[in-house]
Amino acid sequence: MSYNIAIDGPAGAGKSTIARAVAKRMGILYVDTGAMYRAMALFMLREGVDPGDESRIDDKCREADITIRYEGDEQVVYLNGENVNPYLRTEEVGNMASATSARPKVREKMVELQHTLAAQSDCVMDGRDIGTCVLPDAQVKIYLTASSAVRARRRFDELEKKGQPCDLETIRKDIEERDYRDMHREHSPLCRAKDAILVDSSDMTIEEVIAHILKLCER
Ligand code: DC
């Protein structure tokens, strides 16, 4: 049986940075499930699908073949044979992913892929429903969060560094709306699993969070 660590939490809590670092230090795989939903969202955007058109999303998702390969330390997402990693981290794709990931047909497809990866390798998997739905038997479950003000500030700094113009209040509003959608959707909403350990990173540095999680895994 493989060793799995599940990290869930809202957008901008630092899940991917922390999950990647924990995986690297433990010498196991990092599985970024958000990137899979983002690849599906990119497909929908390219096809001109309206985020509110549920039946079209259900229909279209059958045409998207999403696979994962590991190239060095990097998880590479292929959408119908194309490496789409460079297109996944935009606000537009993130917002579309929040809408399309609410559809059970989309989730079914992605969860199947996640089960295969987790069964094949020891891994740290991050997302919204990993501890609750995808890997309910994960050996360690973390619910990583931070206040929306802190998360918005981190995202703002990140975008500024990249030279992308942005507005702090707009980012904060976007984050709060996405939290609401992710937490209130009918299927696999974001919530803390009963046996997940709560880690609030609002007043912690990345290094502190990584060290804390590594300690929890040692136990
Ligand atoms: O973590 P992220 O920002 O890359 O995720 C993008 C969207 O995908 C997010 O709004 C919710 C959705 N998602 C999900 O529903 N389930 C997951 N396991 C991971 C992400």
Image (cartoon, rainbow, N blue to C red):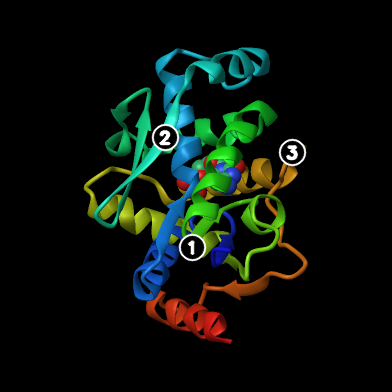
- Few, some or many residues within 10 Å of mark 1 (<14, 14–19, 20+): many
Q: Quadrant of residue 89?
A: top left
Q: Residue at x 40, y 74 (%)?
A: 26
Distance Cα–Cα, label 2 vs label 3: 23 Å
Could you say whether the residue bearing mark 2 is in a helix, strand or loop? strand
Whether residue 174 appears in this view of the structure is: no
Could you say whether the residue bearing mark 3 is in a helix, strand or loop? loop
Q: Are marks 1 and 3 in contact (CB under 8 Å)?
A: no
Callout 3 amino acid: His
In the rendered image, the vertical position of residue 124 relative to residue 162, given as above or below: below
Whether residue 164 appears in this view of the structure is: yes
Q: Name the residue that disc number 3 marks.
A: 187
- Few, some or many residues within 10 Å of mark 2 (<14, 14–19, 20+): some
Q: Are marks 2 and 3 in contact (CB under 8 Å)?
A: no
Q: Name the residue that disc number 1 marks.
A: 124
Nearest the eye: 56 or 148: 56
Q: Name the residue that disc number 2 marks.
A: 67
Distance Cα–Cα, label 1 vs label 3: 23 Å
1 vs 3, front mark: 1
Distance Cα–Cα, label 2 vs label 1: 18 Å
- Few, some or many residues within 10 Å of mark 3 (<14, 14–19, 20+): some
Q: Left or right of 184: which side holds 29? A: left
